[in-house]
Image: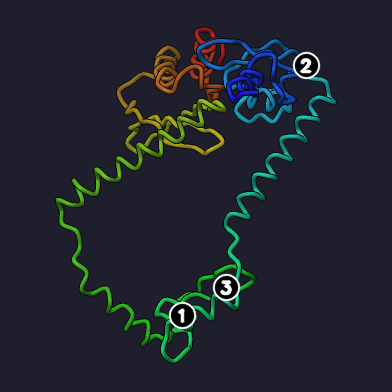
Amino acid sequence: MSASDSGRGRKRKNVAGNQTNPGWEHGIEIVTATKKVQCKYCNVTRSGGIFRLKHHLACTHQNVESCPLVPEDVRGKFMSLLRTQTLESQNKKRKMFDVGDDSEEEVELLSCHHQNKQKRVGAMDKFVMKKSGRQNQKTLNQMFKKEERDDIGDYGKGLVPPSYHEIRVTFLKKEVHETLQLVDEFKEQWKKTGCTIMLDGWSDRKRRSICNFLVNSPNGTIFLSSLDTSDISKTGEKVFEMLDEVVEKVGEENVVQVVIDNASNYKLAGQMLMDKRKGLF
């Protein structure tokens, strides 16, 4: 059989009719521009693929509402499955960062680089000790007396500080660029698992108010934007306009829920938002 024949005989893992993930036994794939799955029990349709369906069935409340009709044995099955996957992921990360002690052969090779056949201790080696295969940093107070710590401080006296222009232009632009890159990483997570929009409002002693909009996902919470509302009357309609604009910015297909205050005007805004965007709650 040729390579091309072999390729035609195989199906991709997640194409319709060939899903091997156990979650597909309880969901129906909806073919749209964004990957959506319909729950077989409550018929709710959500974006995010099979990942979010499993949390929906396990009732974890992790960026998706729980299924009200899922059988208890199915809920327990997916709760156990997700717990096992989480533990495996944690163990994999832990193994990646484990660092063992140098072997005797490695120490001998290092010693050969010195004429006296002894491993030379560098200046920074004094700060580090090895314990149980991991490196633990000691404080300066533990390793040196006060006078010796003062001598170490002398090494920084010749450092030329950055100029005013470098701080307000060069370094600021670099920091903005890195922040935007971080936001892009969070946005990719929103597409995969969905996210929660959170509104946090506060006022200072002069009764000036501001509303902060944040987005939460399994990657964590990130600040999105803020709005000066000192001269804005926070009626239900106005709060709805603010929230609707943020949902549009994040992407309605990525938003699972919106968390706001429980005052009457916010409750009204929340109801208006759900009336307009049926996939939110």
Q: How is the image coloured?
A: rainbow
The mark tally for this picture is 3
Q: Are marks 3 and 1 in contact (CB under 8 Å)?
A: no
Q: Nearer the viewer, residue 10 or 244?
A: 10
As drawn, 98 above or below 247 = below
Tag 2: Cα neighbours inside 10 Å, few (<14), some, or many (≥20)? few
Sequence-wise, the earlier of marks 2 and 3 is 2
Q: Is residue 30 left or right of residue 236?
A: right
Tell me the residue that label 3 is attached to.
Answer: 102
Spatial CA distance of label 2 from label 3 is 56 Å
Image-quadrant location for residue 44: top right
Amino acid beneath label 3: Asp
Q: Amino acid at mark 2?
A: Leu
Disc 1 crowd rating (10 Å Cα; few below 14, some 14-19, many 20+) is: few
In what element is the residue under mark 3?
loop
Residue occupying image coordinates x 69% and y 20%: 19
Residue 241 at x, y = what percent?
Answer: 40, 14
Q: Residue at x 45, y 14 (%)?
A: 236
Residue 267 sits in quarter: top right
Q: Residue at x 20, y 73 (%)?
A: 158
Residue 2 x/y as whole percent: 61, 23
Q: Nearer the viewer, residue 90 or 172?
A: 90
Residue highlighted by disc 2: 69
- Residue occupying the point 78% across, 36% down: 80
Instruction: Looking at this view, name the residue that lies furthest to the top.
Output: 275
Looking at the image, the residue that sits furthest to the right is 73
What is the CA distance from the residue labelled 2 to the residue labelled 1?
A: 62 Å
Between disc 2 and disc 3, the foreground one is 3
Q: Nearer the viewer, mark 2 or mark 1?
A: 1
| Residue labelled with disc 1 | 126
